[in-house]
Image (cartoon, rainbow, N blue to C red):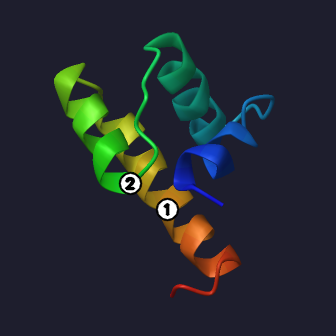
Amino acid sequence: MKFSQFLKSFLEENSPIGDLARDLVLTKSKATTYHGIKNTLLKHNACDGAFDALERAYDLFKKENNNY
């Protein structure tokens, strides 16, 4: 599973990670990796909370995919 697909599983969740997922959909981001999504956030001058949510989401992704 790609990281972007993992994030999309949070679209309906009322949380910072859900907010991040919805923001990525709104920006029509084509990024699928952690680094691509981070670059998208940088490009759009995202707030610190978005970067924090990205880090938390990536930690969860790695744990669920045994990449930790």
Q: Which mark is residue 58?
A: 1
Q: Residue at x 76, y 43 (%)?
A: 9
Q: Quadrant of residue 21?
A: top right
Q: Indicate whether 49 appears above or below 30.
A: below
Q: Which residue is mark 2?
A: 34
Q: Indicate whether 45 appears above or below 52.
A: above
Picture quarter with the N terminus: bottom right
Instruction: Tell me the CA gap for discs 2 and 1.
Output: 7 Å
* Residue 34: image location, x then y, percent: 38, 54
Q: Residue furthest right?
A: 12
Q: How many marks?
A: 2
Disc 2 marks a residue whose amino acid type is: Tyr
Of 25 and 60, nearer the camera is 25
Q: Indicate whether 55 appears above or below 21.
A: below
For mark 2, give the secondary structure.
Answer: helix
48 with respect to 50 (left or right): left
Label 1 environment density (alpha carbons within 10 Å; few <14, some 14–19, many ≥20): some
Q: Quadrant of residue 19?
A: top right
Q: Residue at x 51, y 69 (%)?
A: 59
Pair 2/1: label in front: 2
Label 2 environment density (alpha carbons within 10 Å; few <14, some 14–19, many ≥20): some
Q: Residue at x 73, y 30 (%)?
A: 11
Of 8 and 13, nearer the camera is 8
27 with respect to 26 (left or right): left
* Residue 47: image location, x then y, percent: 29, 28
Q: Residue at x 68, y 38 (%)?
A: 8
For mark 1, give the secondary structure.
Answer: helix
- Pointer 2 or 1: first along the chain: 2
Disc 1 marks a residue whose amino acid type is: Tyr
* Residue 31: image location, x then y, percent: 40, 37
CB of mark 2 within 8 Å of CB of mark 1? yes
